[in-house]
Amino acid sequence: MRNLTNILITGGAGFIGSNLVRHIFEKTDFTGRIVNLDVLTYAGNPYSLSDIDKQYGGSRYFFEKADIRNRAAVDAILVKYKIDTVIHLAAESHVDRSITGPEEFITTNINGTFTLLEALRSFWTDFDGKLFHHVSTDEVYGSLGNEGFFTEDTPYDPRSPYSAAKSASDHLVRAYFHTYGLPITLSNCSNNYGPYQFPEKLIPVMIEKMLDEKPLPVYGDGKNIRDWLYVEDHNSAVWTIINDGETGRSYNIGGENEWENIKLVHSLCEIVAKERGKEADYYKKLITYVKDRPGHDRRYAIDCSRMKKELGWKQAFDFEGGLLLTVKWYLENRKWIDTVKSGEYLNWMEKNYDER
Ligand code: NAD
Ligand code: TYD
């Protein structure tokens, strides 16, 4: 068990990051401080943590609006809060955006990670009790056929600008461990879902379109497969690694829960229909097959036995329960949705997405 005191979470205003901050305050025995460093792109929303800010703001929770690419800003935050642990989530995270505009993915995901690593290398004069945990994706491994699973030893084979940039950042993190001895751990996780996910990813897109009675865009033949994990399970895994993971080691995290997109969309349609008192097939008629995503990875599937065997982690949420919680959350939190939809997101959707 590591002794964590002052944790810096980058990207803590995003989907997984905001759930992580809440998870640490509400579900763990951590007694130290959390600093949330986030530049607040379209995907970052401090409103996601307004309850946490009210309860812990100024004593154990601090928000710093800053860019991970800005070395001076990062340096100042490390010094100000005497940071001993970093959980790095800040990134451009959406594959479709990386296809229409890759540049931010390169500068934030690669240069931003590099800036953090360099800042830590000079700030941590001794590495005792320090840790940099890098949150990454299974997409670095490329695409699977019908058989097999990604293990931690699967060679990297990224296909999108997003996964290529995440791959580069993973390599840099490992290089800093081997070259400079910087204490790092790394995790590669499958597709997350749950509350506070920006409505550009599959599950919240479908829920929002159903509520608006708009076409539900299914890419290609709808038979691409993803392994879905409830965000709370991802965060419990990250917390386990932070505390008990071996320095220098990578861990795969997954749901062991593979779904074809079209089957998942059917399930979602049924859940939303039930929650809204409509007949089971009400929303299915909105399903519309649209042009496929270029370079669309066919199948992701994670072997997470290292997490289970070495660190004793396991998933707590089954898919049925997790999806129901998620749908209910989106139905009950319209103010959050209105807040995130009021920004740049709408313009981008109109330009790049709705015309598919
Ligand atoms: P998100 O897009 O919801 O949030 C990203 C956050 O990073 C936002 O709050 C944004 O404002 C912030 N950010 C972006 N650029 C920044 C910069 N230059 N400086 C400071 N902050 C910046 O993403 P997410 O889905 O929460 O993903 C978080 C991390 O987890 C990412 O690194 C992603 O690659 C990884 N991941 C995501 C998934 C998934 O299914 N969503 C799965 C595996 C791994
Ligand atoms: P997404 O949520 O963007 O995650 P990722 O590309 O990182 O896996 O997409 C999940 C799957 O759903 C992927 O195969 C693409 C597909 N998809 C659609 O069919 N329609 C949509 O509107 C979206 C956003 C995704």
Image (cartoon, grey):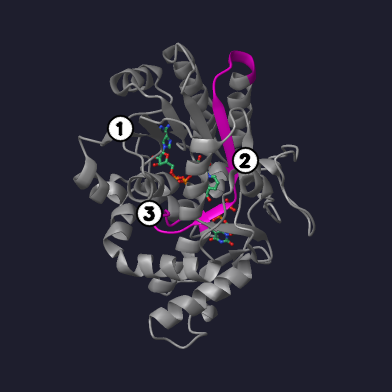
- Is 269 placed above or below 220 here? below
Quadrant assignment for ligand 2: bottom right
Mark 2 vs mark 1: which is more N-terminal?
Answer: 1
Type of amino acid under label 2: Tyr
For the C terminus, the quadrant is: bottom right
| Earlier-in-chain disc, 2 versus 3 | 2
What residue is shown with label 1? 65
Does the image show residue 287?
no
In the image shown, does 260 or 247 lie closer to the viewer? 247
Q: Disc 3 marks which residue?
A: 346
Q: Nearer the viewer, mark 2 or mark 3?
A: 2
Q: Which mark is residue 251?
A: 2
* 189 within the magenta span: yes
As displayed, is residue 282 above or below residue 204? below
Residue type (three-letter) at the residue carrying disc 3: Leu
Of 150 and 201, nearer the camera is 150
Disc 3 is placed on an element classified as: helix
Q: In front: 104, or 64?
A: 64
Residue type marked 1: Lys
In percent of the image, x 45 and y 36: which residue is there?
90
Of discs 3 and 1, which sits in the foreground? 1
Dot 2: what SS? Answer: strand
How would you rate the neighbour count of disc 3 (Cα within 10 Å): few for under 14, some for 14-19, many for 20 or more? Answer: some
Dot 2 alpha-carbon crowd within 10 angstroms: few under 14, some 14 to 19, many 20 or more? many
Q: CA distance from mark 3 to mark 1?
A: 23 Å
Earlier along the polypeptide chain: callout 3 or callout 1?
Answer: 1
